[in-house]
Amino acid sequence: MLAKMHAHLVCVGVARVTAWTILCDFDGTISVEDVIDSLLDRFGRPGWEALEQDWRAGRIGSRECMSGQVALLDVSSKELDEHLDGLWIDHAFPAFVSRAAELGTPIRVVSDGLDYAIHRILGRYDLDHLPLAANHLAPGTPPRQWQLTSPFQSEGCRSGTCKCACVAQARSGGAKTLLIGDGASDFCAADQVDFVFAKHRLIEHCRAAGIPYVPITGFEDALELLPRLLDGSLLAEHQPRVLPAVSNF
């Protein structure tokens, strides 16, 4: 009898915890607009546009670009907080987080953006408990007001946050991985995951690379698709592929 009860409890536990981990971009995915772009447009000193052009042309990586741009921000702590308090997230993201928790599916925010900004914005929605990998914004050494460090960078990766390393960490426990993203910072990680919910530029990348994905306009779509992903029916509709071996970062 005890063995049967134990088996029943194990089955209940398995039903509550799925075999997926969700990695979710922030800027332009969770947030309505790109946070760093909005800060640079309003508070950036001359020179940040040239760094942006160098990054888009592939002459520098995003880590070098972001570090230089953050150093050009002319904004006080008060002005920064006031600006961040005027930025919004996708209205359906809180419901998506709640549903994922009900289904036992962990979410980690993986961003090449700014940790302080992300915590500040998500905090207004009581969502700053979500695990986060992002660049670290800190007061700078005068005359610079702000400086950027990248605690989640990896050797050989030019991004501030190596999203491929985040994927490898999630996969190391045996979980399948879902990426939700929108742009160039998600391209490399999209090549490593099991499935993608894609917005904007990431749609074309997934289509061109043959990556299993569905296009979404926002988290209302993601909320509707999530149960189908977890029960396997969504993945079954797309051509399976063999993922590369997990690397140690």
Image: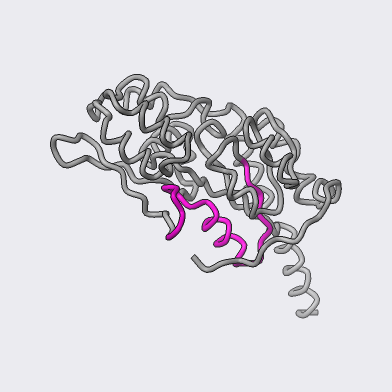
Q: Position of residue 84 (x, y in %)?
A: 38, 27
Q: How many marks?
A: 0
219 with respect to 52 (left or right): right
Q: Residue at x 45, y 48 (%)?
A: 159
Q: Residue at x 42, y 27 (%)?
A: 37
Q: Position of residue 152 (x, y in %)?
A: 42, 54
* 231 in the magenta segment: no
Q: Residue at x 44, y 58 (%)?
A: 154
Q: Nearer the viewer, residue 247 or 100?
A: 247
Q: Nearer the viewer, residue 94 or 209?
A: 209
Q: Quadrant of residue 29?
A: top right
Considering only vertical position in the picture, is 33 above or below 61? above
Q: Residue at x 86, y 46 (%)?
A: 237
Q: Quadrant of residue 13?
A: bottom right
249 with respect to 96 (left or right): left
Q: Position of residue 12 (x, y in %)?
A: 74, 62
Considering only vertical position in the picture, is 19 above or below 55? below
Q: How is the image coloured?
A: one colour
Give the magenta part as a residue range: 155-180
Q: Quadrant of the N terminus?
A: bottom right
* 160 in the magenta segment: yes
